[in-house]
């Protein structure tokens, strides 16, 4: 047997070329037949009677009924709960209980002396609140407090300021409403979705807050009928601290402040007030001569006081007046009349 000779190579290449040409022609014919068959089949590609019957059956199927009956029952029970309130303090507690049936988490912050102090909450962690003290409302909350915005329905500085003392976890959806007495905000009501993706029944929650506002005025007027009339409160400046609820939310408990805690509080007050004198010497000097320190340094004093009550609590300052006394001593030369119309003086 002999090997193929080099002289046969041109003949082999010719055979290969003719074979490849024939294969390409056959592939092209097959592809054209497939395309023609596919295009022809498209004309028959239409729903049959079985599919149409299934579509009609699905369209006629009733959608899941909205649980309006259950919502109505929950709202009715919540309104009944509010209606049984015997005092303003009882009303606020009942409002939180009523909201618990509609939302995952809720809290009430009392507005007093320009600050928002946590009153009570439902649905948050067992160890809440994490931090004591009052919150300085950011502009977003101030807009709600003044009635410029009916509510807050998004996460932002307002929600962050209120949620921080209660929980380290922020929910995905929130709502913040103002509880009003005689058209003035006396508390902020916070509700959020907790671990859920959406906030259930925000409008029902708003309806409960509006109902509680109306009942707040009713309870206050009923109390006034049984007591001596109170002198009218002066009209507040638009940026002045919010009016407090006419009746105390609950009796203030005496705060036990030991010597070590008092020394720390006095030290912080001196640092805060000293910073005001350090950075605003001209205003302090003018106030010592003419009076009205608060009128000239309102923002600075409010920020310093907010820092103090955030560390030691509003109750400590109300009972012991450590910050106020330090302001009078260091900035007013001991003359309280030079402080001016400070709401916490």
Image (spheres, rainbow, N blue to C red):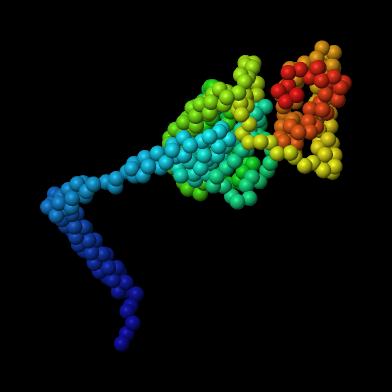
Q: Tell me: 132 left or right of 207.
A: right
Q: x, y (%) of residue 66?
A: 32, 43
Residue that sits furthest to the right in the current view:
333
Q: Tell me: 244 left or right of 295.
A: left
Closest to the observer, 112 or 220:
220
Q: Tell me: 79 left or right of 246.
A: left
Residue that sits furthest to the bottom in the current view:
1
Locate the N terminus and report the quarter of the image it occupies. bottom left
Q: x, y (%) of residue 174?
A: 51, 39
- Across the whole image, how many numbered discs are drawn on residues? 0
* Residue beneath the point at 29% across and 68% down: 13
Asked if one can make out residue 191 in the rendered structure from this viewpoint, the answer is: no
Closest to the observer, 258 or 237:
258
Asked if one can make out residue 246 in the rendered structure from this viewpoint, the answer is: yes
Q: Is residue 181 above or below residue 104?
A: above
Q: Is residue 229 above or below residue 61?
A: above
* Residue beneath the point at 61% across and 34% down: 249
Q: Tell me: 315 left or right of 248.
A: right
Locate the C terminus and report the quarter of the image it occupies. top right
Q: x, y (%) of residue 30?
A: 19, 60
Residue that sits furthest to the top in the current view:
290
Closest to the observer, 35 or 211:
211
Q: Is residue 53 above or below residue 142?
A: below
Q: Is residue 53 above or below residue 240?
A: below
* Residue beneath the point at 64% across and 17% down: 231
Q: x, y (%) of residue 65?
A: 29, 45
Closest to the observer, 124 or 296:
124
* Residue beneath the point at 65% across and 24% down: 241
């Amino acid at each position: 047997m002999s090997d193929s000779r080099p002289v046969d190579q041109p003949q082999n290449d010719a055979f290969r070329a003719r074979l490849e040409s024939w294969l390409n022609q056959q592939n092209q014919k097959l592809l054209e037949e497939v395309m023609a068959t596919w295009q022809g089949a498209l004309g028959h590609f239409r729903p049959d009677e079985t599919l149409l019957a299934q579509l009609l059956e699905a369209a006629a199927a009733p959608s899941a009924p909205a649980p309006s009956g259950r919502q109505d029952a929950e709202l009715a029970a919540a309104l009944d709960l509010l209606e049984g309130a015997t005092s303003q303090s009882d009303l606020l507690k009942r409002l939180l209980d009523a909201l618990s049936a509609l939302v995952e988490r809720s809290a009430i912050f009392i507005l007093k002396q320009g600050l928002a102090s946590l009153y009570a909450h439902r649905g948050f962690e067992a160890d809440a609140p994490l931090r004591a003290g009052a919150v300085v409302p950011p502009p977003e909350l101030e807009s709600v407090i003044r009635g410029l915005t009916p509510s807050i329905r998004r996460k932002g500085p307002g929600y962050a300021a209120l949620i921080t003392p209660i929980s380290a976890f922020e929910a995905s959806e929130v709502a913040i409403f103002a509880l009003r007495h005689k058209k003035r905000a006396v508390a902020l009501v916070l509700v959020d979705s907790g671990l859920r993706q959406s906030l259930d029944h925000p409008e029902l929650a708003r309806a409960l807050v509006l109902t509680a506002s109306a009942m707040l005025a009713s309870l206050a007027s009923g109390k006034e009928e049984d007591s001596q009339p109170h002198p009218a409160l002066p009209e507040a400046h638009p940026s002045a601290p919010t009016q407090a609820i006419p009746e105390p939310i609950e009796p203030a408990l005496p705060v036990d402040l030991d010597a070590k805690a008092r020394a720390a509080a006095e030290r912080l007050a001196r640092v805060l007030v000293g910073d005001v004198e350090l950075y605003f010497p001209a205003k302090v000097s003018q106030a010592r001569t003419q009076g009205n320190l608060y009128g000239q340094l309102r923002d600075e004093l409010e920020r310093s006081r907010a820092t103090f009550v955030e560390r030691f609590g509003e109750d400590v300052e109300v009972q012991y007046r450590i910050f106020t006394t330090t302001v009078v001593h260091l900035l007013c030369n001991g003359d309280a009349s030079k402080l001016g119309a400070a709401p916490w003086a």
